Structures are given as C-alpha cells and as structure tokens.
Amino acid sequence: AFMNEVGLISGIFTERDAACSFNLSIQTQVEEIEKERHLKMQFIEFLEAFARGCDIASKRPPDTEEEDWPEEKCKKQPLGDKINNVLPDVLKILKKEFVKKYKWPETD
C-alpha cells in the first residue's frame, strides 16, 4: 500500500517487486511458527525496503519532463537522488503538522 501511495508501483516496479523488497529487507526469523516478528518490520528494515523500491523504480526528478529523462538515465542516478525524487510524494501522504516542520536536506 505504501509503495503504491507514493507512486513507486509502475510497469518497472510492480507490486510483486514491492513484496520482494519487503521480504528481502526483513531479517530472517528463527521462530516463525509461534511468534509474529516476521510480520512486523523494524524501522531500519522499512528504510531498506523503501530504498530498494526507490532503486528499482528509478523515478525521474520532480518537475522534469519525461523526454529529458529516459529510463536508462533514470536508472543511472545515484541511490540518494532516486530516494530524493520520491520524497515529495511521501510528503503528500504524511500529516500536515509533520510536513510543516520538515526541512529538505541541503546538498553541496
């Protein structure tokens, strides 16, 4: 649901890819039968799954034209840029109180 809400799900990054990203990001659990830990992610595991999704989806920068950003160019972006390209969409689904306090990271 989250990956879809922030616009990562597409022909390049499917819902199946999203599920795989989450499964690969969560630590292997010894006791999956009697405990539910394998169903609940830690925050760091969520961040890894989100980064995996951003990497595969390779969205172009906001406010850019599609013809200026072909798929190959998008895929060659550094991971940090791919994540930053998705953050405006993440902010759209967060509470307004948080968005007002959010400061964009400064780049050199």
Image (spheres, rainbow, N blue to C red):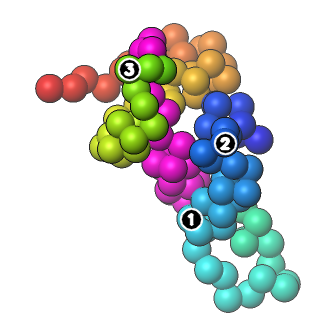
The residue beneath circle 1 is 25
Q: Earlier in the sequence, mark 2 or mark 1?
A: 2
Q: Is residue 58 magenta?
A: yes
* Quarter of the figure that contains the N terminus: top right
Residue found at x 80% / y 72%? 36
Residue found at x 49% / y 28%? 87
C-alpha span from label 2 to label 1 = 22 Å
Q: In the image, is residue 71 above or below residue 69? A: below
> Would residue 1 be found to the left or right of residue 89 on screen?
right
Q: Which residues are magenta?
A: 41-65
Identify the amino acid type marked 1.
Answer: Ser
The residue beneath circle 2 is 11
Mark carried by residue 68 = 3
Mark 3 residue element: helix
Q: Earlier in the sequence, mark 2 or mark 3?
A: 2
> Would residue 20 be found to the left or right of residue 1 on screen?
left
- Of badges 2 and 1, nearer the viewer stands 2
Name the chief secondary structure element in magenta. Answer: helix
- Of badges 3 and 1, nearer the viewer stands 3
Mark carried by residue 14 = none
Identify the amino acid type marked 2.
Answer: Gly
Crowd around label 3: few <14 · some 14–19 · many ≥20 (10 Å)? few
